[in-house]
Amino acid sequence: MLKFGLTPVFLSNDLELLSRLKYYLSRQTGREVQLVQRRTYEEITALLLSGQLTAAWICGYPLVQYREKLALVAVPLWREQPLYSSYLIVPVGREAAGIDNLRGDLHAFSDPNSNSGFLVTAALLAERGLKPEGFFRDTIFTYGHRNVVRAVASGLAQSGSVDGYVWEVMASLEPELTTRTKVIRKSELLGFPPVACLAAQANSMDVELVRKALLSMADDPEGLAILSLLKLDGFAEEPQSLYDPIAAKMQLIRNLSP
């Protein structure tokens, strides 16, 4: 059996998508496939590191945290690139031009192991010699990028850090939510959340079957339907160096004095 891990990003609650993904992977690999979901990045990463998953769709931040133990399987293509940005958002009526205007906010992050939903903002503050707990009045983790948007749109949070891909997809599918928020900063382009496996299993038959299934998704009618639901163009093989800018952000916050 192939076990494929999913973190709670955009696709976590889409039952049609999950059903189609399971069917597609099973058909393409010729194996029984189990989709494994957990609430946090940490839980899925722990399962992957312990060898309990064949592969998992994780985030660039866990990948660089464990870059000696994890290897890339495939990277999604969004707008024809293996890249995305982190967005800083505020309620639509608020006057704010950048992060410096957010001092003292109750700020919503998605997950402490998310690149776009935590690390990018923490690194931006680290460049100023600051930590989130010293800059914001308080912070919350929503454990889902959709939930960050909801928190800011509803006024539960005064600002938030969110995956730009998720915000843009929500803007096309749930505009009643995103139109109540405003993007005040887009980060530089960074490596899109990848599918990864244990480095020790990177050349195994199981991982190779998953890799081929993902890389051929754009050439298959059912695969194209899944990509359409995800608003993605396909999957590609990319070098680990794609995530070096994320590793640099991780090092930046680690270099801050305790």
Image: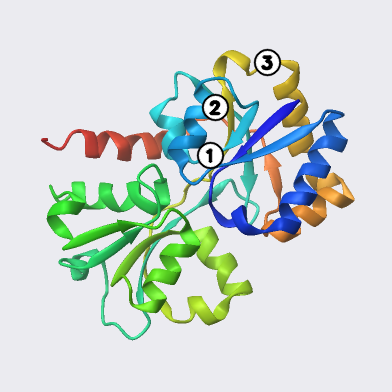
Dots 1 and 2: beta carbons under 8 Å?
yes
Query: Quick check: can you spot residue 41?
Result: yes
Give the vertical position of 39 relative to 50 (above or below). Answer: below
Which of these two is toward me, 8 or 209? Answer: 8
Which quarter of the rendering shows the N terminus?
top right
The residue at which mark 2 appears reads as 48
Q: Is 235 above or below relative to 30?
A: below
In the picture provided, is 159 more to the left or to the right than 146? left
Circle 2 crowding by C-alpha within 10 Å: few under 14, some 14–19, many from 20: many
Would you name the residue on which mark 1 appears?
Answer: 58
- In the image, which is nearer the foreground, mark 1 or mark 3? 1
Q: CA distance from mark 3 to mark 2?
A: 16 Å
Q: Quadrant of residue 82?
A: top right
Q: Residues within 10 Å of mark 3 (few under 14, many from 20)?
A: few
Mark 3 or 2: in front is 2
Describe the element under mark 3 as helix, strand or loop. Answer: loop
The reply to whether residue 243 is in sight is no
Name the residue that disc number 3 marks: 203
Whether 239 is drawn above or below 146: the answer is above
The answer to whether 186 appears left or right of 22 in the picture is: left
Specify whether 121 is left or right of 41: left
Of the residues under marks 3 and 2, which one precedes in the sequence?
2
The amino acid at mark 3 is Asn
Residue at 39% x, 42% y: name it: 113
Task: Indicate the position of residue 149 as horizontal and vertical percent values.
Answer: 44, 68
Q: What amino acid does circle 1 point to?
A: Ile
Q: Residues within 10 Å of mark 1 (few under 14, many from 20)?
A: many
For marks 1 and 3 on the same chain, the one whose residue lies earlier in the sequence: 1
